């Protein structure tokens, strides 16, 4: 399938404008009520998301309510298993069998989908806003950054924004003679406290998640704090082996190899429950995200009584950095104009269900002032999460991010699982990244 | 009394005038559907893969001719080198023991021992189990302090260590592939005429001599089939690495086909994936021809 050139995009944008001008006439012609489609006939949308049972439940209810007010737009909803999600999505997009609207991890939105012209820029009017600035103002500052391209163009609306927090098991803390109120503020403290938990209880003190695809996501948390980058601002040169990158991976290595705060070899291999070890009380500390908290609450409610959410440990607590990643609803650039408009209207409807997504699925959609909504206040550890969500901070990504993710996974595994040297592992990774981005 | 039915030779002579004119054409007509399908679904894709290997092609845009750039990338990419080396280690590590074990098991089962049929079924069962199910079973066996560690009284990081993960996959693969090769060897053994063994015994040959001078030469055609299948299956391996380790940890179980898959379907780089696939295809052709040459050089027919 051919990529859309700038000229084609411009023509399509012009067509979109013309369609909007003609929308009232089209609506009258098809006899639709005010909520009808701008197209002249019925529109059928293919909608895909990754698999997360609470997300699917809320989404199905939102689709049903959308269909009631928009009978001319039908929605065929498909959930894709998480292990196949990125591969199947990318492949289907290239063969023209992909969805019209779908959700996608923001790193891949910016690193793979936007550079390859696979996405339609947001249509604020179809979403129900007067302009892009109104849409932006409806969300927390920077919250749309996860789906914003290099030129500042916005391509998606947040399905979920996950800010990193830190959870501790108060019971394991007490058994190790530690005071949960005196939680770790730095990664060194995570190491020393983790080692005490290991020694006193035999449980993991602190562990990262050692599953495919998780390494770079977690390293990004440390990179934001050390000032490291994977590639420079040009996107053409790897800088992961420079000071910030080395410091970040060294912190990870120290937690494993110096402090022995956790054993990566015994971490869970169950990709369906990445936080299994913490959930069953076999781990004292973990990086935590709101969606994971919701999963733990539903599947392992007992552990919540032994759990405390604290701020993310920092390299320099005086210059704290947070970390966000998320999924956005996006629309295919290859769908017809009518489908794209219907898709954005549908996304606008889904986005209005932010309270249900938060209360029933634990997914934070960072609409302005969400913390003070009823659902926001009822969220477990709501005040701690509210602090984490003050201003969104996304990690800068580059083109070919999916390959860079694989390369970095290898570098992290070499250091943490095989005990190799940090600098040499990152030098090797940088060499491969340079090859990948320069080809 | 002579049969009124026309014998085949006479029937052949009767229809020859019609047949001789159009026999070749009829033969070709029968072959055309299969040839067309083979061309469309085997020859064309193979040719297309070789063609695309000279292009930068991400599926998101039109292919751009890029000469030998994809091949240069492969020769410089340490992951590609690792994938090739891992594939060779897997091939030798899995199929040499598998073939030896399969021959021994087949020899044992090729007797009139009671329960041989049931044993054959048991050996063959892993062959029909899907790799996904195998992964579930063996992940339990290999997990830290899992079944294998407990039985052997050891503490090995089977799937999370770059040293042990390749060995773990080889163990699983031997378990899964053994039955397939046992059946092949059994088929070969059962084609050997009993008279040869009886004659050898009459001549005073012992068990080892009967094996060396009767079984081995008679099994040679099957051995060619077995070694070719082993080489092709070993070099084309994908499933165990995909479902059990995803090529990790740290690329220690990355194999050629997983490299092709990742480049094509994860990174969206079909040109590079095609180059690796084309190289693999060339290697398989060369190895296949070499095996035939060795077989014929040793007196095979």
Image (tube, coloured by chain):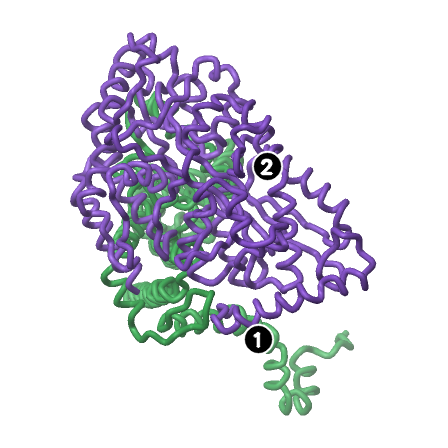
Q: Is residue B153 left or right of residue A133?
A: left
- Location of residue A172 with respect to B217 vertically, above or below: above
- Location of residue B105 with respect to A302 vertically, above or below: below
Secondary structure category for the residue under label 1:
helix
Residue B102 x %, y % = 39, 43
Q: Which chain is green?
A: B
Q: Please give the residue where the numbered disc 2 appears in the rendered image.
A: A354
Label 2 CA crowd tier, 10 Å (few <14, some 14–19, many 20+) = many
Q: Is residue B49 left or right of residue A357?
A: left
Instruction: Note whether residue B299 is visible.
Output: no
Labels 2 and 1 touching (C-beta < 8 A): no
Residue B65 x %, y % = 36, 76
- Location of residue B150 with respect to B229 vertically, above or below: above
Q: Which mark is residue B36?
A: 1
Q: Quadrant of residue A389?
A: top left
Residue found at the far right of this picture = A31
Q: Quadrant of residue A205?
A: top left
Q: Between B91 and A179, which is closer to the camera in this rendering?
A: A179
* In this view, the mark in front (2 or 1): 2
- Location of residue B164 with respect to A403 vertically, above or below: above
At x 30% / y 60%, what residue is drawn? A437
Secondary structure category for the residue under label 2:
helix
Residue B291 x %, y % = 32, 63
Q: Which chain is purple?
A: A
The chain containing the residue under callout 2 comes to A
Quadrant including the N terminus of chain B: bottom right
Q: Is residue A386 left or right of residue B276?
A: right
Instruction: Note whether residue A88 is visible.
Output: yes
Label 1 CA crowd tier, 10 Å (few <14, some 14–19, many 20+) = few
At x 52% / y 22%, what residue is drawn? A297
């Amino acid at each position: 399938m051919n990529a859309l050139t700038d000229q084609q995009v411009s023509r399509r944008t012009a067509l979109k404008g013309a369609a909007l001008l003609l929308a009232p006439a089209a609506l009258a012609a098809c006899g639709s009520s005010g909520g009808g489609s701008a197209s002249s006939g019925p529109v059928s949308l293919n909608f895909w998301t990754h698999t997360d049972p609470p997300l699917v439940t809320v989404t199905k209810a939102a689709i049903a309510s959308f269909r009631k007010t928009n009978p001319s737009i039908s929605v065929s909803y498909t959930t894709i298993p998480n292990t196949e999600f990125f591969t199947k999505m990318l492949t289907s997009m290239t063969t023209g069998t992909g969805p019209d609207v779908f959700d996608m991890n923001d790193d891949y939105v910016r690193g793979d989908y936007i550079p390859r012209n696979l996405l339609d820029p947001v249509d604020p009017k179809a979403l129900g806003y007067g302009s892009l600035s109104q849409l932006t103002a409806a969300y927390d500052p920077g919250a749309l950054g996860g789906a914003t391209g290099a030129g500042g163009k916005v391509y998606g609306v947040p399905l979920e924004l996950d800010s990193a927090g830190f959870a501790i098991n108060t019971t394991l803390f007490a058994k190790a003679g530690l005071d949960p109120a005196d939680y770790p503020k730095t990664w060194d403290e995570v190491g020393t406290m983790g080692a005490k938990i290991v020694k006193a209880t035999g449980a993991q003190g602190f562990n990262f998640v050692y599953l495919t695809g998780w390494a770079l996501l977690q390293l990004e948390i440390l990179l934001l704090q050390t000032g490291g980058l994977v590639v420079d601002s040009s996107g053409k040169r790897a800088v992961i082996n420079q000071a910030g990158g080395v410091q970040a991976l060294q912190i990870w290595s120290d937690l494993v190899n110096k402090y022995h705060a956790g054993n990566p070899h015994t971490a869970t291999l169950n990709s369906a429950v990445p936080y299994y070890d913490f959930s069953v009380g076999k781990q004292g500390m973990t990086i935590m995200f709101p969606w994971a908290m919701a999963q733990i609450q539903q599947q392992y409610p007992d552990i919540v009584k032994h759990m405390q959410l604290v701020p993310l440990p920092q390299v320099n607590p005086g210059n704290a950095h947070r970390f966000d990643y998320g999924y956005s609803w996006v629309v295919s650039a290859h769908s017809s104009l009518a489908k794209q408009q219907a898709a954005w209207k549908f996304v606008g409807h889904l986005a209005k269900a932010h309270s249900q997504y938060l209360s029933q699925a634990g997914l934070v959609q960072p609409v302005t002032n969400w913390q003070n909504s009823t659902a926001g206040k009822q969220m477990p550890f709501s005040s701690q999460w509210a602090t984490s969500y003050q201003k969104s901070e996304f990690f800068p990504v580059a083109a070919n991010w999916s390959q860079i993710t694989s390369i970095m996974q290898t570098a992290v595994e070499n250091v943490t699982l095989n005990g190799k040297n940090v600098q040499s592992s990152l030098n090797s990774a940088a060499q491969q990244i340079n090859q990948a981005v320069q080809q | 009394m002579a049969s009124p039915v026309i014998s085949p030779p006479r029937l052949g002579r009767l229809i020859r005038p019609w047949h001789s004119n159009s026999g070749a054409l009829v033969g070709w007509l029968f072959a055309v559907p299969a040839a067309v399908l083979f061309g469309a679904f085997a020859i064309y894709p193979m040719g297309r893969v070789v063609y695309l290997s000279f292009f930068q092609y991400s599926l998101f845009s039109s292919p751009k001719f890029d000469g030998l750039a994809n091949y240069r990338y492969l020769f410089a990419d340490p992951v590609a080198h690792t994938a090739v080396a891992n594939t060779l280690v897997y091939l030798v590590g899995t199929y040499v023991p598998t073939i030896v074990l399969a021959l021994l098991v087949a020899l044992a089962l090729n007797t009139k021992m009671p329960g041989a049929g049931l044993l054959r079924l048991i050996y063959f069962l892993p062959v029909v189990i899907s790799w996904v199910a195998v992964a579930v079973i063996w992940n339990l066996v290999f997990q830290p302090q899992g079944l294998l560690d407990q039985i052997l009284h050891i503490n090995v990081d089977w799937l999370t260590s770059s040293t042990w993960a390749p060995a773990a996959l080889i163990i699983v693969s031997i378990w899964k592939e053994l039955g397939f090769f046992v059946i092949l060897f059994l088929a070969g053994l059962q084609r050997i005429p009993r008279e040869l063994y009886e004659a050898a015994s009459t001549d005073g040959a012992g068990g080892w001599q009967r094996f060396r001078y009767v079984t081995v030469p008679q099994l040679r055609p099957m051995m060619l089939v077995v070694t070719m299948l082993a080489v092709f299956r070993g070099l084309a391996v994908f499933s165990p690495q995909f479902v059990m380790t995803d090529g990790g940890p740290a690329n220690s179980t990355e194999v050629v086909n997983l490299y092709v898959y990742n480049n094509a379907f994860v990174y969206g780089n079909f040109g590079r994936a095609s180059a690796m696939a084309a190289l693999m295809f060339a290697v398989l052709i060369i190895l296949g021809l070499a095996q035939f040459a060795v077989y014929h050089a040793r007196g095979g027919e």
